[in-house]
Image (cartoon, helix red, strand yellow):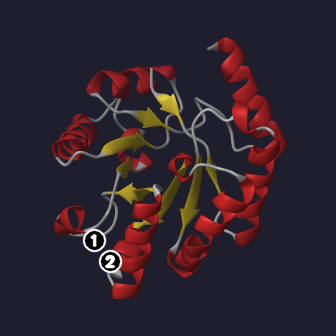
């Protein structure tokens, strides 16, 4: 079965709030925090090193989701930030892969660890052979480049099972959980640990 992923909203307070929850109950969090950063907020990522040190967290448990528009703005400053985060141990994912205008050459040049397959492809898989073909192609491409994959928009067990069979590493969507506040998310992870 696919591994579920939670995500947070891009803000300075979000980074602090997530780490406050984790600091007091760190052993409960099984995996990581995924923080989605659009282009104007990328500079917040530079604070991550201080945040994880201040709160005693492991940077390997963080994944920064960055939209294709950030990768398209391939400035030296952006590249330096991304490589700095990678050296810190943070994973970098390209969000909504396949919906923008990015060149496949970016996948070679940029420090990307995870391709997130856009829900527009995922939700149509059960009735559209073309959607299945696109998802298969993205999974194959990611595997060849040594990247992991996350499918977005999973709402049924059938979709989760199909994606797992195709080799998708993890997924997110209403099948796993609705968006949750910090305290509710903590209870969600506690329940998962009990069940697991």
Q: Is residue 51 above or below residue 22?
A: below
Question: Left or right: where does residue 123 sit relative to residue 166?
Answer: right
- What residue appears at the point 34 percent right and 86 percent down from the top-left corner? 75
Q: Nearer the viewer, residue 85 or 158?
A: 85
Q: Which residue is mark 2?
A: 72
- What residue appears at the point 56 percent right and 79 percent down from the top-left corner? 43
How many numbered markers are drawn? 2
Q: Residues within 10 Å of mark 2 (few under 14, many from 20)?
A: few
- Element marked by disc 2: helix
Q: Nearer the viewer, residue 35 or 46?
A: 46
- What residue appears at the point 28 percent right and 67 percent down from the top-left corner? 110
Mark 1 and mark 2 lie on one chain; the one further toward the N terminus is: 2
Q: Quick check: marks 1 and 2 in contact, CB under 8 Å? A: yes
Q: Position of residue 40 (x, y in %)?
A: 55, 81
Question: Left or right: where does residue 108 sit relative to residue 120?
Answer: left
The quarter of the image holding the N terminus is top left
């Amino acid at each position: 079965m696919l591994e579920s992923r939670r995500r947070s909203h891009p803000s300075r307070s979000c980074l602090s709030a997530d780490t406050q929850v984790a600091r007091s109950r760190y052993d409960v969090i099984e995996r990581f925090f995924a923080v989605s950063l659009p282009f104007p907020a990328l500079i917040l990522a530079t604070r991550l090193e201080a945040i994880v040190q201040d709160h005693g967290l492991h940077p390997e448990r963080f994944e920064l989701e960055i939209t294709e528009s950030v990768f398209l703005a391939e400035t030296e400053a952006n590249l330096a930030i991304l490589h700095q985060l990678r050296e810190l141990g943070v994973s970098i994912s390209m969000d909504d892969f396949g919906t923008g205008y990015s060149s496949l050459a970016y996948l070679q040049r940029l420090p990307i660890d995870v391709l997130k397959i856009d829900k527009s492809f995922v939700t149509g898989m059960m009735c559209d052979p073309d959607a299945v073909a696109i998802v298969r192609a993205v999974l194959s491409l990611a595997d060849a480049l040594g990247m992991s994959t996350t499918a977005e928009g999973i709402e049924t067990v059938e979709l989760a099972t199909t994606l797992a069979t195709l080799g998708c590493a993890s997924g997110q969507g209403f099948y796993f959980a609705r968006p949750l506040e910090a305290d509710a998310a903590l209870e969600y992870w506690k329940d998962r640990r009990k069940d697991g």
